[in-house]
């Protein structure tokens, strides 16, 4: 009887462990979109952010994740936690800068006359938590004849979010960019004679 109870308790514990692990997605800088998100087959950061279901936990290995487009979470109540050392069985460090999301200045988003660069775009999200992650953006690209407007730079762009947490995170924004000078206006014309 005692052996049966012990066996049932062990099976219940293992079942809870397996169910708990299903909500964890593992990510590395060299992860692939085809990765399943396990410890042994991690996925890339973009795929993890766009596919993580509500209530899941994204564990990011140490390193720099360079992205050319803004990242956004797919669901609600998601935890994004950095500082995991994948080469040491996913042990944890809280060293500042160990896990960095670096957003290049390619592919600005937003309206054509008010473009922006941001590492994270979080809109209408609730209950998310970022922990032990450094978020950094590049300086804005220089204005060109094709894109004459200045570019605004955000580390994190948030709109209509609630109940969120930032724990031991650094947000380092690059410099915004000035637009090109406008063209000179035309000369005015002479007025007409007054009337009585």
Image (cartoon, rainbow, N blue to C red):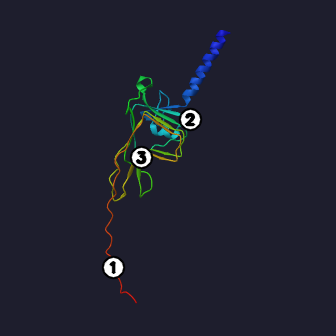
Question: Measured from the top left, where is residue 42 in percent x and y?
Answer: 47, 31
Instruction: Using the image as rendered, state which of residue 62 and residue 47 is in the foreground.
Output: 62
Where residue 88 sits, quadrant-wise, is top left
| Residue tagged 1 | 189
Above or below 12: residue 63: below
Q: Are marks 3 and 2 in contact (CB under 8 Å)?
A: no
**Residue sitting at x 58%, y 27%:** 19
Q: Nearer the viewer, mark 1 or mark 3?
A: 1
**Residue sitting at x 33%, y 55%:** 178
Element under disc 3: strand
Question: Measured from the top left, where is residue 146 in percent x and y?
Answer: 36, 58
In the picture, measured across the screen, residue 82 lies left or right of residue 8, that is left
Mark 1–mark 3 Cα distance, whole angstroms, equals: 46 Å
In the picture, measured across the screen, residue 149 lies left or right of residue 73, that is left
- Crowd band around label 1 with a 10 angstrom C-alpha radius: few (<14), some (14–19), many (20+): few
Element under disc 2: loop
Question: Measured from the top left, where is residue 182 in percent x and y?
Answer: 33, 64
Q: Earlier in the sequence, mark 1 or mark 3?
A: 3
Instruction: Using the image as rendered, state which of residue 25 and residue 131 is in the foreground.
Output: 131
Per the rendering, the mark at residue 118 is 3
Label tally: 3
**Residue sitting at x 38%, y 29%:** 95
Give the position of the N terminus as an image quadrant.
top right
Mark 3–mark 2 Cα distance, whole angstroms, equals: 24 Å
Element under disc 1: loop
Per the rendering, the mark at residue 55 is 2
Q: Nearer the viewer, mark 2 or mark 1?
A: 1
Q: Earlier in the sequence, mark 2 or mark 1?
A: 2
Q: Earlier in the sequence, mark 3 or mark 2?
A: 2
Where residue 32 sits, quadrant-wise, is top left
């Amino acid at each position: 009887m005692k052996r049966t109870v012990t066996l049932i308790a062990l099976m219940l514990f293992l079942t809870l462990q397996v169910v708990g692990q299903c909500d964890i997605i593992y990510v590395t800088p060299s992860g692939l979109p085809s990765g399943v998100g396990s410890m042994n087959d991690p996925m890339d950061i973009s795929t993890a952010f766009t596919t993580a279901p509500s209530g899941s936990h994204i564990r990011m290995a140490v390193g720099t994740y360079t992205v050319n487009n803004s990242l956004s979470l797919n669901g609600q109540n998601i935890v994004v936690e950095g500082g995991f050392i994948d080469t040491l069985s996913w042990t944890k460090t809280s060293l500042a800068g160990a896990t960095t999301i670096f957003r290049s200045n390619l592919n600005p988003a937003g309206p054509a006359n008010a473009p922006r660069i941001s590492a994270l775009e979080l809109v209408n999200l609730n209950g998310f938590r970022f922990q032990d992650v450094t978020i950094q953006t590049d300086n804005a690209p220089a204005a060109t004849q094709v894109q004459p407007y200045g570019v605004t730079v955000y580390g994190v762009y948030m709109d209509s979010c609630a109940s969120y947490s930032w724990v031991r995170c650094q947000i380092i924004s690059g410099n915004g960019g000035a637009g090109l000078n406008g063209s000179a206006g035309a000369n005015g014309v002479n007025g007409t004679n007054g009337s009585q």
